[in-house]
Amino acid sequence: MRLMVTGGAGYVGSVVAAQLVEAGHDVTVLDDLSTGHEDAVPDGARFVRADITQAHDALDGVDAVLHFAAKSLVGESVAKPGRYWANNLGGTLALLDAMRDKGVAKIVFSSTAATYGEPERSPIQESDPTRPTNPYGASKLAVDTALTAFAQVRGLGAVSLRYFNVAGAHGRYRERHTVETHLIPNVLKVATGERDNVSVFGTDYPTPDGTCVRDYIHVSDLARAHLLALGAIAPGEHKIYNLGSGTGFSVQEVISVCREVTGHQIPVVVGERRPGDPAVLVASSAKIQRELGWKPERAALGDIVSDAWRALSQNT
Ligand code: UFG
């Protein structure tokens, strides 16, 4: 297929683009490099430097779009909500209009667990209430809502994948955020010597060890789900799937695994709770396993951390 990958110079987008090229697809990456890196665009993919409101011309002859380009920092979204509504919702609506103009009627969308907000039960299922607690999650949920409507009225075929905590590396493709807020890369940066210690944001949550519990999914497993989603697009339907490993690990457990993998003692500083962090976020991925036959292959936290560590230590 001829595919456009928006945000294909970013962490998840570049891994999906690499897997699509490997599978023999014709891939165009569209990325404005506001947070991505041009050297993350896989060999064999065409690169267009543009933002998603300028995708029109590059959509000629495209069969489907995989849409990753987005602002994705929860804290920043609270401080600068306009940026999130403009980019994530406004930008996506412009992309969807350009797709309609060019007769591109298939999309796979990068959604998030942040659409659910504070869950009522664990693991979270797709039918659970969506009550985002920050503009990032709200802007992604608004796109999901628009996709459902466009499927009904325009015959668009769409699949949204709601990611839980993506981590690990796929070969040379790894997390390289200028502003790093995520737990695993921040812990590993202590082991490389880039940071002196890692802050644990809150030890008084209602969890077994008092720290937040999250569902970590390997980026290679996550990316593979996009190829399955592409094959499952049906005209006039919007399908939504959670993507996680189904097992929760606390912040303390993640740090312990990072100590084992790196052999570094990784000093910890206990800090305040980070505003907006739910105590426990664990996905039920039963629906995508049942309907698309997806299965995580590197679900063990040790594998996820080892791959992230190998890619980081080989490239710093
Ligand atoms: N944490 C620390 N110290 C750090 C960084 C994180 O203790 O230096 C804690 C956080 O408080 C949280 C856990 O580690 O309890 C995981 O935090 P991350 O920032 O790695 O991930 P989040 O769970 O906050 O966010 C992820 C995605 C978001 C998405 C969200 C869904 O990165 O894009 O899941 O709720 F919105």
Image (spheres, grey):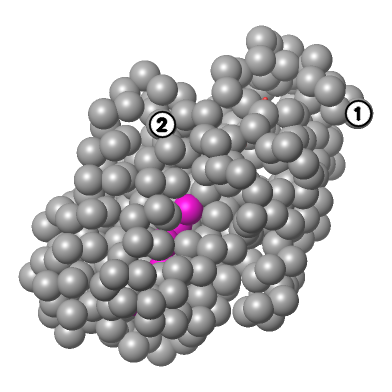
Q: Amino acid at mark 1?
A: Pro
Residue 217 sits in quarter: bottom right
Q: Is residue 48 above or below residue 209?
A: below
Image mark for residue 18? none
Residue 222: x and y in percent read 59, 63
Quarter of the rendering occupied by the N terminus: bottom left
Q: Earlier in the sequence, mark 1 or mark 2?
A: 2
**Residue tagged by mark 1?**
208
The residue under label 2 is 135
- The magenta stretch spans which residues? 106-111
The residue most toward the left is 57
Q: Nearer the viewer, residue 182 or 106?
A: 106
**15 or 211: nearer the viewer:** 211
| Local crowd size for mark 1, using a 10 Å CA cut-off: few (<14), some (14–19), many (≥20) | few
Judged left or right of residue 252, residue 135 is left
Q: Amino acid at mark 2?
A: Pro
Residue ID at (17%, 63%): 97
Query: Is residue 212 found left or right of 2 in the rendered image?
Result: right
Q: Nearer the viewer, residue 115 or 212?
A: 115
Q: Position of residue 268 (x, y in %)?
A: 74, 18
Magenta segment: does it hold 107? Answer: yes
Residue at position x 79%, y 25% in the image: 211
Is most of the magenta stretch helix, strand or loop?
Answer: strand
Q: CA distance from mark 1 to mark 2?
A: 30 Å
> Is 253 positioned to the left or the right of 197 in the image?
right
Side of 127 where 61 appears, left or right: left
Mark 2 Cα within 10 Å, few/some/many (few <14, many 20+)? many
Viewer-side residue, 156 vs 80: 156
